[in-house]
Image: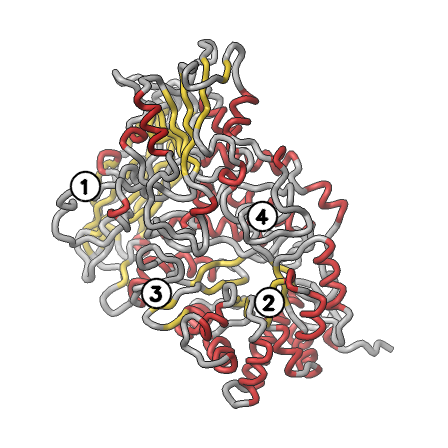
Amino acid sequence: MNTSPLYQDPTQPVEVRVKDLLKKMTLPEKVGQMLQLNGQDGYQEQIRAMHVGSLLHINGSDADAAIDASLQSRLGIPVLLADDGIHGHSFWAGATIFPTQLALACSWDTDLLKEVARVTALEMRATGLKWTFSPVLCLARDLRWGRVDETFGEDPLLIGDFALAMVEGYQGAGLHDPNAVLATAKHYAGYSETLGGRDAAEAELSRRKLRSSFLTPFERAAKSGVMTFMTGYQSIDGIPSTANRWLLTEVLKDEWGFKGIVVTDWNNVGHLVRDQRVCADFAHAAAMAVKAGNDLIMATPEFFEGCQDAVAQGLLTEAEVDTVVGRILSLKFRMGLFEHPGRSEPQRIAAVIGCSEHRNVALRAARESLVLLRNELAGGTSLLPLDKNKPRVVAIVGPNADHPLSQLGDWSLGSGQMVGPSGTHHPRHTIVTVLDGLKNRLPSGWSIGTLEQADLILAAVGDSLELIGEEKSTATLELLNGQKELIEQIGALGKPWVGVLINSKPLVLPQTLLDAPALIELFNPGMEGGTALAEALWGDLNPSGKLTISMPRHVGQQPVYYNAVRGQHGRRYADLTQDPAFHFGFGLSYTSFELQVPGLDKPVIDQEGEWSLKVRVTNTGPYDGVEIVQVYVEDEVTSATWARRELKAWKRVAAAAGSTQEILLKLRAQDLWIIDGTGNRVVEPGHFRILIGTSSRDQDLQEFWGEVR
């Protein structure tokens, strides 16, 4: 006769197992399940004394020891292990580190992003982790914000498209997939709408403005099966995100039907007491967080006593605690953790971490993310690609020419968030810097020399880790630490040269760099960035990346983004244009493309209808290449002010030199919605300007008109 409790029987329905386990738990054990603490602060004691349900920042042998400690507890509830696998398995030495999220977005390739997430999940699972705090669904707005590199850029449609691809890659075949990790939609919501670019400052957002743009990618993620949401640090209209019941419960859980769990960001409940000061003590903070709709409380150990005090004082009922703990236990049962807690696997680590197959994905990502911004010599000729058969002496200068940490960017070993047993930095030999890439692929007869010797100069400039990340917003966007002076010196030499940008976010570039014969944007390209750059220089790679974020001319233009609300007086500043230096959707190629669009298939559709757009894409140049066809819409008259222009469809098209590809794009009337003055999503009848082209710039677009009735 089986005397094991029902909750340990995998043949029982999840609801039965949860109910049985809850009946056996004490209040301290329940509250412990709601805690997610930093495992580097002593996970054995955290599990013993506080019954902690989830840990982050440990992996490998530490992950195994934590799992064993949890299984040896009174009820044997397995611990759920998580970490910041932001653009690769960030904190495991030798793991595959991809371009940052902003760089990846420039590929406009959802298949690639899915594969990046799949590789990350495989490498994380090998070390005992089952949850990543990625992807970021924030809209980039003020570029002074230190976390712009973590976003996909400035467009809600693209953010949703790319986020869904990564969620699918992370979560694989579902909760029982041994090669998958839970994905996290963060930071919910409006965290990126800062004052003065300052991190976690109060966001000046109305509910209508949230629904107009900031919430749309999160809604798509919630309805597409992402299993976790993470709250933002900031407050909106005086209410901290962690205390915002409207966001966390009424919208996310009730309106969108989200069935996963909500985790706070780092010590958000502590912020309610210490920084935002909306709670006098941790009992009130715990009650506020639980009632708002949070499930797991990250990095606030005071919640353990505070939540119990809240129940004792009548601020919370134990039934309310049970509801939250039930969601957490349900997730653990559905993941199969009680049967297969998922320890690390040394053989699997050796086989998959940083393997050649995974590095090839990183190289593909670096290739597709590379954006050619300028390629023009005097007389209209092009500097790139370089002729391998005409040897030159190349000088490689600039602080980011051979700087592994700047190339990897934030959220990697060495960036400061975590130091683990696997090491403090990613092994140097795993990272191909700009200098490494050029040395590895230098054609026969070419050589590397000094500025006095060179007849070609490559200048790698940008920013560094000191200017990237949480609490590291910047007052300026200019090149710092003598880089402007270096660029001026290079420009004055009169030699052909290539500017290479390795930067976390768009920067304000000096005119000399804007006028460079060639300019390439890499952002933070990951460990294979130097290889991709070298391939592009000599024409083994034809650049295809397109910006998903506008690059400003001056910091005073902030915020500058293509889909701003129309209605201002004038089109420029009195002393400066409002146009960016480089527009959203822009990127050059070594070949040329011609788009032929017959027009809309019908002039008028009803609100359930759609337009079909046939586009013939002809590669009219000498190289095989990729073009990103983009469709923008302008609603001629709206009942409430609205964005001047919005991306509504796009497609990545590969075409051999001289060939033509015909593509079909759909534009549904239901996608032409606005949020009206009462806060409702509506499609209003009227005339729409349809713009088809290769960037958001007016000169790159063809115009058509249609009507919705």
- Sequence order check, earlier mark of 3 and 4: 4
- Residue occupying the point 42% across, 15% down: 454
Q: Is residue 281 left or right of residue 193?
A: right
Question: What is the number of the mark on residue 651?
Answer: none
Q: Is residue 432 left or right of residue 374?
A: right
Q: Is residue 632 left or right of residue 486?
A: left
| Secondary structure under the numbered disc 1 in the rendered image | loop
Indicate the amino acid at tag 4.
Ser
Indicate the amino acid at tag 2.
Gln
Q: CA distance from mark 3 to mark 4?
A: 29 Å
Please state which of residues 58 and 212 is positioned toward the viewer in this rendering.
58
Q: Are marks 2 and 1 in contact (CB under 8 Å)?
A: no
Q: Which residue is mark 4?
A: 90
| Secondary structure under the numbered disc 3 in the rendered image | loop
| Secondary structure under the numbered disc 4 in the rendered image | loop
- Sequence order check, earlier mark of 4 and 1: 4
Question: What is the number of the mark on residue 36?
Answer: 2
Q: Which residue is mark 3?
A: 202
Q: CA distance from mark 1 to mark 3?
A: 29 Å
Q: Are marks 2 and 4 in contact (CB under 8 Å)?
A: no
Q: Are marks 3 and 2 in contact (CB under 8 Å)?
A: no
- Residue occupying the point 66% across, 51% down: 179
- Sequence order check, earlier mark of 1 and 3: 3
Q: CA distance from mark 3 to mark 2?
A: 25 Å
